[in-house]
Image (tube, rainbow, N blue to C red):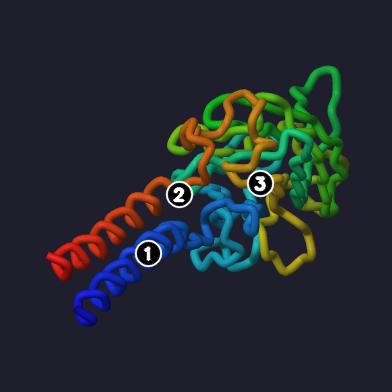
C-alpha cells in the first residue's frame, strides 16, 4: 500500500514538473529576436551597402569589418542612394510596444556631396520606418558634408505601431539621399571631387551610434490592449495561462491516489 501511495505522488510530481518546465523551455531566449530584456535592433551590412540587414543581437560576424558600408560616386556623378535594411529573419512571435512609449532611432552617417541648386535634383537624407512594406513614420534630416553626422530620431508610438505581426510586419529602415557631386575649381586636377555616402553599422570603431530602441512589452501585459490589435486572448475563464492544464493534471493525479485507496479498501 505504501508503495502505491509513493507511486501516485511520484506521478503527481513528475506531471507538475512537466507542466511548469515546458513554458520555460519554450520561451528560451533568442538573441536575434526582440523582447522586454532585448529591445535594441542593430543594423549591419556589407562594405559597399550592397546588402543591409538587422536583428536584435549585438554580435554579428558577417558585417563589414570596418564597421560601415560606403558607396562611392565618380566625379560629376549624382550622389544618389535608396536602400532598405530589413530583418535577417522573421519574428517568431508578434512584437508589442508600449502605446505610451517612444521608438528611438540612432544612425551614423558620413556624406560627401555638393549643394542643392535650382537646376540639380536634390533630396535631403530621408529615413523611413517601415512596418513590413508600409511606411509608418518618415522624416528628413540636414547633413553636413565631409564630416560625421549623428542622427537621433524619436518617434512617439502611434496606434498603428503597437503590434508588429510576425512573418510580414517586421520593422525595416529605408534610406534615401540625392545631391550633386562636389564641384569647384581644381576638381579632377588638384582636388578629388568624387562623392560618397557612408552608413555606420552597429559596433563600429568610430563612435557613431546606429541602432533602434523599441519600447517592447510582454504580449500578456494589459497595457498592450487597446492598440490597433490587442494581444491574443488566453480564454474567458479568468484563470492564469496554463492554470487549466495544471488543474487537469492535478485531477489526474488525485484520481490515481483515489484509485489506489479504493483498491486497498476493496
Give the x, y percent position of residue 46: 54, 55
Determine contact: label 3, label 1, CB under 8 Å: no
Q: Which of 133 and 245 is in front in this view?
A: 245
Residue drawn at (58%, 26%) of the image: 229
Q: Which of 3 and 103 is in front in this view?
A: 3
Say whether residue 264 is left or right of residue 48: left
Say whether residue 96 is left or right of residue 232: right
Residue drawn at (69%, 65%) of the image: 204
Q: Identify the residue position indicated by label 2 in the image.
A: 243
Q: Which one is earlier in the sequence, the residue at label 3 or at label 1?
A: 1
Q: What element carries label 3?
A: strand
Say whether residue 23 is left or right of residue 1: right
Q: Identify the residue position indicated by label 3 in the image.
A: 216
Q: What element carries label 2?
A: helix
Q: Identify the residue position indicated by label 1 in the image.
A: 16
**Which is more foreground, mark 3 or mark 2?**
2
Amino acid at each position: 500500500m505504501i508503495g502505491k501511495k509513493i507511486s501516485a505522488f511520484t506521478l503527481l510530481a513528475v506531471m507538475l514538473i512537466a507542466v511548469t518546465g515546458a513554458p520555460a523551455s519554450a520561451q528560451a531566449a533568442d538573441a536575434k529576436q526582440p523582447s522586454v530584456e532585448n529591445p535594441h535592433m542593430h543594423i549591419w551590412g556589407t562594405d559597399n551597402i550592397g546588402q543591409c540587414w538587422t536583428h536584435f543581437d549585438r554580435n554579428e560576424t558577417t558585417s563589414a569589418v570596418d564597421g560601415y558600408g560606403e558607396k562611392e560616386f565618380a566625379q560629376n556623378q549624382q550622389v544618389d542612394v535608396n536602400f532598405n535594411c530589413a530583418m535577417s529573419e522573421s519574428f517568431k512571435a508578434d512584437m508589442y510596444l508600449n502605446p505610451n512609449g517612444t521608438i528611438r532611432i540612432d544612425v551614423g552617417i558620413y556624406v560627401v556631396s555638393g549643394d542643392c541648386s535650382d537646376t540639380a535634383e536634390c533630396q535631403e537624407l530621408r529615413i523611413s520606418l517601415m512596418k513590413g512594406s508600409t511606411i509608418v513614420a518618415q522624416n528628413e534630416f540636414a547633413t553636413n558634408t565631409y564630416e560625421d553626422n549623428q542622427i537621433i530620431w524619436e518617434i512617439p508610438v502611434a496606434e498603428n505601431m503597437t503590434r508588429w505581426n510576425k512573418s510580414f510586419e517586421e520593422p525595416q529602415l529605408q534610406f534615401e539621399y540625392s545631391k550633386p557631386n562636389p564641384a569647384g575649381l581644381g576638381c579632377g586636377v588638384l582636388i578629388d571631387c568624387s562623392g560618397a555616402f557612408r552608413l555606420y553599422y552597429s559596433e563600429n570603431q568610430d563612435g557613431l551610434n546606429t541602432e533602434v530602441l523599441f519600447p517592447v512589452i510582454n504580449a500578456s501585459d494589459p497595457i498592450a490592449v487597446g492598440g490597433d490589435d490587442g494581444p491574443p486572448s488566453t480564454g474567458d475563464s479568468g484563470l492564469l495561462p496554463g492554470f487549466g492544464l495544471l488543474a487537469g493534471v492535478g485531477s489526474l493525479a488525485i484520481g490515481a491516489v483515489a484509485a489506489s485507496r479504493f483498491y486497498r479498501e476493496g
